Image (spheres, rainbow, N blue to C red):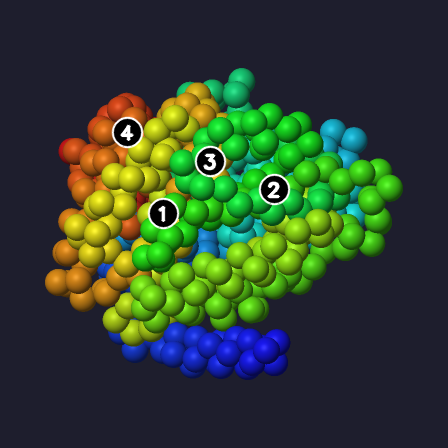
Amino acid sequence: MRKGIVLLLLTLLSALTYSYTNHSDQDPYLLTDYSRLHPVKVKRIVKGQETEQLVQVVRDAAAQGLKVSIAGQRHSQGGHTYYKDAVVVDMTPFNRVLAIDAAARTVTVQAGATWADVQRSIQPYGLAIRTMQSQNIFTVGGSLSVNAHGRDIRNGSLIKSVLSYRLLMADGRILEVSRTSHSELFPLALGGYGLFGIILDVTLSLTDDEIYRLRVDTVSTEDYIDYFRQNVLGDPNIQMHLARVSVGPDHDLTDMYALNYEIAAETEQDPGLFRLRDNEQWVTPAKALFQLNRLSDAWKDTFWKMQLKVFQGQDGELISRNNAMRSDSDFMETQEPGWNDLLQEYFIPMDEYADFLRDFGSVLKRHEMNLLNITVRYVNKDDEAELSYATEDMFALVCLFRTPLSEQGQEKFGEGIQTVVNQVIAHGGTYYLPYAGYPTKAQLYAAYPKAETFFRLKRKYDPDELFYNGFYEQYGVN
């Protein structure tokens, strides 16, 4: 039996590797992002190397009347990192860790560094990141630009970890921005989608690396709110949490399992556990199993049962905080020509969670939307970021959809997403802006009442609109 399962996993993984590496629907002379939706020809791509070079790039673009877009790993999916005929600044080579203050528990790092780079530098000091996405392959600057959040339930969105950052402005000046210096800019460029300038480097507050014991629970979607408040948020030993919702026809948005990371006992604090892993444990079989979701709706229930067994098998395992934040970046990636798996994310007030899921399920059926996965995280209320998505304590529903890239397929899918967003707004929620821009301009302003002020201040600090991207053109231009 075990041998048969292993052979099935290997077969699925082989099929996934073979079928999803062809990029034949992409023009190699065009630039796009993870979504592969709106490729455009850009003026040139400039790799960030030194501060003086970046200043000159900005000044030259301004003198030539060109637009500037800023890119990291280009996993934002709504044209945030490029624009037609623009100069695209690739920040990934600008990636040094500049300083670590172990006593103060801070790190200063250039914007192009990945979270993996940061983890490798701080782990020997017994330190860990407070907040980041569930994968560590993203650049720090990219994460700042979308004000990321993740598994941590105690430290809020990323803006709360930021002490200060240096920002290269449209006029070539470099400003040191913090809560006390150029304070109006502080909540704008953080979660500012590259529209206020180039974030050069940032000083972050860190926390201690710790050993956690993984606890795996099952719960119904109806009971999840009470379960989370009493058994997760109400337990000070639990530091990180995520949950997943069943999406198959036999368990249609009714069942959940939760992964809780609780501080292990002192006797379990094995120093060897702090060594950084190369990959998240079990990611290869989980990746292979996820291929079942793409085959048909019937396979989704099979996948749900199998993944639940995989994670229940990890119940009680010990893992360090840094390792719990090193999820494999390729877990859900697909490159099948003409198709893609695209993320959308919805932030729902805690008390609205179960009701929203019921309405969400009706929309999925009515619009025949192929939902592959829902991951649920908790996000603390954020009063700082101008475009805060967490207007109160909320559950974040990270939804992965399978969708055709054809014009007709995209039109139908977009109509479905807009209907979902209407339900989100009706339940007092918001949606995440880094993903493909299916929502209308009216929906963005309904979900983000401060958007008008945000875009007005963008033009105050960048009156010639030098920093520009597809997201700004779609939602911010008057």
Q: Evaluate if marks 3 and 1 touch, with contact meaning CB atoms under 8 Å apart.
A: no
Q: Position of residue 40 (x, y in %)?
A: 25, 61
Circle 2 residues within 10 Å: few <14, some 14–19, many ≥20 = many
Observer-side mark, 3 or 2, equals 3
- The quadrant in which the N terminus is found is bottom right
Q: Evaluate if marks 3 and 4 touch, with contact meaning CB atoms under 8 Å apart.
A: no
Circle 1 residues within 10 Å: few <14, some 14–19, many ≥20 = many
- The amino acid type, in three-letter code, at marker 3 is Tyr
Observer-side mark, 1 or 2, equals 1
The Cα atoms of the two marked residues, 3 and 1, are separated by 12 Å
Residue at the disc numbered 3: 224
Q: Residue at x 23, y 36 (%)?
A: 423
Circle 4 residues within 10 Å: few <14, some 14–19, many ≥20 = some
Which mark, residue 260?
Answer: 2
SS class, disc 1: loop
Residue at the disc numbered 1: 253
The Cα atoms of the two marked residues, 3 and 2, are separated by 13 Å
Where 329 falls versus 459 (above or below)? below
Mark earlier in primary sequence (4, 2): 2
Q: On the image, which quarter does residue 15 sit in?
A: bottom left
- The amino acid type, in three-letter code, at marker 2 is Asn
Q: Evaluate if marks 1 and 4 touch, with contact meaning CB atoms under 8 Å apart.
A: no
Mark earlier in primary sequence (1, 4): 1
SS class, disc 4: loop
SS class, disc 3: helix
Circle 3 residues within 10 Å: few <14, some 14–19, many ≥20 = many
The Cα atoms of the two marked residues, 4 and 2, are separated by 27 Å
- The quadrant in which the C terminus is found is top left
